[in-house]
Image: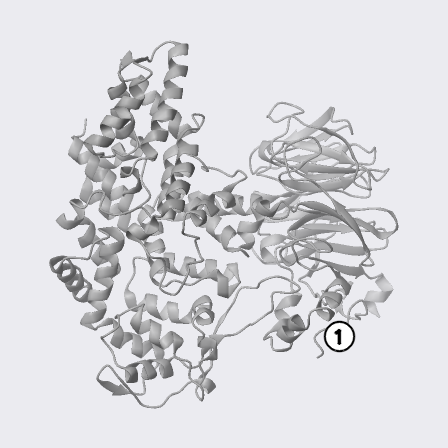
Amino acid sequence: MPAVDEIALMAHLMRRAGFGVNRDELEAYVAKGYEATVEELLHPVDDVYLERDVIDRYFIEIEDQRQASAAGGWWLYRMINTRSPLEEKMTLFWHGLFATAWEKIMNGRAMAAQIDMFRRNCLGDLPTMLVELSRDPAMIIWLDNDTNHKDAPNENYGRELLELFSMGVGNYTEEDVKSCTRAFTGWTIANLIPRYPWGAFPLEFEYRSDDHDDGEKEFLGETGRFSGEEIIEIIVRQPATARFIAGKLYNFFVSDDPAPEEAIQTLSDTYLESGYSIKAVMRVLLNSQFFKVARFAKVKGPAELVAGVLRLVGDFNGVKPGLMDAAMESAYIGQELLNPPTVEGWHTGKEWIDSGSLVGRVNFAADQVGNIDNTGVQAIIRRLAEGGTTLTPEELVDGCLELVGPLEVSEKTHRTLVNLAGKDGNTGTKSADQRAELAQRVGKTLQLIVATREFQFA
Amino acid sequence: MDPIKEKKGMSTLQVGAGRFRYSHTIGIDDFSGRSFRYAVDLALGKNGRLYVLQRGVAMQRNLAVKLCSVDEDFFGEFGVYGTGRGEWTWPAGIAADSQERLYISDEWNQKISVFDNQGSFLNEWGEAGAATGQINRPSGLAFDAEDNLLVVDALNHRIQRLSKEGKYLDGWGGNGAGPGQFNMPWGIAVGPDGQVFVTDWRNHRVQKFGPDGRFALQWGSLGSGQGEFDRPVGIATDVTGDVYVVDSNNHRIQVFDGDGEFKDQLTGDATMSTWAEQLMAANPLMMEQRRVAKNLNQEKGFWKPRGIKVDDQGRVIIVDSGRGRLQVYQKLSEEESTS
């Protein structure tokens, strides 16, 4: 049997580098070993097992992807059923960093194509990602680069590329913004087709050399007739970019608190030494001591929470109605996939939580874990029943805490859970009546657990 | 070109190998009312009447049968989302019997429900399972010459022939890729001599059977060339025995003779429908958007078509599912196509 620490560490890895795993999966990962699991996570497998054709057959709106909810539904399905969880988690990271919203694009297909692009490049190198981002039709519309003309520049994209997407404010001048903007003139949309009367069409990128400012530019201390690609080459080799990416990855994967200098230095050095490889940075991050000790140092984002709970209870493992509604659960508690509030993305950490969203989180999770027909809940019941002929209230609580995480709770929380479970005394596990009672009590105990403060943390 | 003056219904365009003339487009893509949203199939009534089954958006609960005509009249709609009697969750196929009663398959509720041609609920039947007479995700429907219902029993990978009351009569198939086997079949059509044609969706082929279900021949494989398919969906026949296959992921219709010889293909020629013209006329902002649009030619093509029927006048009506419209073609006579 694996050591408790090994289980807890692996559960931590799978919460952060994915959306959590059930106990069977967790034990299988522990058997592989930590570093081997990290390597597996860094090498996503072909997703043919997801049977996209079957999804499309039964969920026409997912195939069509005209609304954010449909594209979000497909993404949630991937988060629940993926065999490459880090791929989906990285995609979520990039979506938060390069935040683009359906609210303005009004074209779910373009939004979904952007998410696919993030997934395709999620563990690649930063220059490729930034070039593809600059060519991405949804981004072009989102930050108005289709109105960035040689004789009438629009600085929106050029500025945000530097400020929000790569270097951070304070590391460039206004002249750099103007040069960056000029380099991306002519990067536009080929087909602007109105939504009426036939719906949204996939958008296509077009480079128009006749609208591109090919003149000399000064940018971050260098001079030349830089193209957009060349501007990105200059951006990605800046130490400020290395620190920016390191900080963003640290805050998404390690802790909501500011990153310590040592961690930033380690990650940014890796970034520069590896030729701007995100995979290399993630390998160092996930194997680092600062990552391993950061258990429950992050508030779960809404999409993480929803996907994690649905994975835990084993729902939506196949096609069934309600997938888009499930995706909207994340929206109701503060994170509508493909529709972030601004170009800054979502405000994370403790800002995920307010009195309304907390109630929503608890209600959603309690509904799911309280449904004892869910296969994941049944698996928890089965494991507990195999533990002995009788369970005391403390054993029931400890068993449930172990199987939903393991989840570490404060002494006070633990005492409260045991006291509440104790009202019904011990429970047997062997006879049919006892099993039925056990199932009900497990459902209730799980509902109490997902209502704790500790369950909100990853 | 004036954005709303794009000609409709007057095309002299002969398409494919000149055997068809594009006629006109019906519908707009919209959430409710006189429009389509994820239409999946259609049935033909008398005097050009059409019954267009739309799946709708699950969260908007706007599934329906839209009652309209091939001449772009709109008569109304019916349909209620749910799991109760006469309600649908995942409606998939529709067929009209000889008395124009409408039979609708539901892939989630695992049943066939029956309505009159005004949308009044009459009956429903069906039991989920794999035993004879049970169904698992029923999709395409068609009536044979005796007015019995052929049901594509998709997840049981078979065809079942049932009476109009749901009594099992006979059936054939099984899971696999061999002759007479299926992998999640979808559409079904009955030819003029009673032959049965089935789109074998995940095997990317069409299979032809005798009226008694005996395997006759098959054609197609995965691809985008002539006679190849990428997940064929709907299927229809005309009075001459030609077979029309909705090659959905290739966004086209392929036409074959009854022996599977390729004859033609249609890729879409949509123009503004009357419904669309009227919508534009009432919304100047939409007209302005069309005025400044780029590459409107992309609007013409099919996008994930699903259903198809050919009426007794040779009008080919295609459910252009991803675009919220029907495209109509006229099959030309031998003389017309060579003139």
Q: Is residue B108 above or below residue A77?
A: above
Percent x, y for residue A294?
Answer: 18, 46
The residue that appears at 66% across and 62% down in the rendered structure is B267
Report the residue marked by disc 1: B5
In the current view of this chain or complex, which residue is farthest to the front?
A: A355
The residue closer to the viewer here, A284 or A179, is A179
Residue B179: quarter of image = top right
Lateral position of residue A80 relative to residue B167, left or right: left
Amino acid at the residue labelled 1:
Lys
The residue that appears at 51% across and 59% down in the rendered structure is A108
Residue A239: quarter of image = bottom left
The residue closer to the viewer here, A178 or B158, is A178
Percent x, y for residue A81?
Answer: 40, 41
The residue that appears at 51% across and 39% down in the rendered structure is A319
Q: Chain under label 1?
A: B
Percent x, y for residue B180?
Answer: 63, 35
Percent x, y for residue A211?
Answer: 46, 85
Residue A446 visible in the snapshot: yes
For the C terminus of chain B, the quadrant is: bottom right
- Secondary structure category for the residue under label 1: loop
The residue closer to the viewer here, A237 or A306, is A306
